[in-house]
Image (spheres, helix red, strand yellow):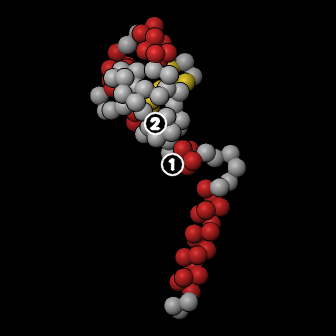
Amino acid sequence: MKRRIPLLVAIIAIAGAAMLASPGCSKSEVQGQATVVNTRCPIMGSKIDPAKVPANLIKEFKGQKVGLCCGQCPAAWDKLTDAEKETKLNASK
């Protein structure tokens, strides 16, 4: 029985690696995240890594995913007019 456990672990590891390497899935999609179009938070101006923004800090705007830097920014973003959002988003790319 001791031999079966390492074999089972190896099979699971190989299957998991194959799933991650399947075509059509980016690393960010596998992690439940989506890449955003900006590199700075449009509210605070802080630098962000577009591939590492958590889903709760992403807002949709005109078909684009906009990344924000912290938990306070989504509410501030929602209060902006579309014209203000567009101006801030353009400045944050």
Of 46 and 77, nearer the camera is: 46
- For label 1, count other residues whose C-alpha is less than 10 Å away and answer few (under 14), some (14-19) or many (20+): few
Residue lying furthest top? 83
Q: Assign a secondary structure to mark 2.
A: loop
- For label 2, count other residues whose C-alpha is less than 10 Å away and answer few (under 14), some (14-19) or many (20+): some
Q: Assign a secondary structure to mark 1.
A: loop
Query: Which residue appears at 45% of the width and 20% of the height?
Result: 92
What amino acid is at disc 2? Asp
51 lies above or below 39: below
What amino acid is at disc 1? Gln
Q: Is residue 4 visible?
A: yes
From the top left corner, tell me how far across and down residue 48 is, in percent.
Answer: 42, 33
Query: Which residue appears at 57% of the width and 22% of the height?
Result: 63
Report the residue marked by disc 2.
Answer: 49
87 lies above or below 31: above
Q: Which mark is residue 41?
A: none
Residue lying furthest right? 23
Report the residue marked by disc 1.
Answer: 31
33 lies above or below 92: below
Residue lying furthest bottom? 1
Of 6 and 79, nearer the camera is: 6
From the top left corner, tell me how far across and down residue 13 is, in percent.
Answer: 57, 69
Of 46 and 2, nearer the camera is: 46
Q: Nearer the viewer, mark 1 or mark 2?
A: 2
Query: Which residue appears at 51% of the width and 31% of the height?
Result: 36
Inter-mark Cα distance, 1 to 2:
15 Å
Q: Is residue 82 visible?
A: no
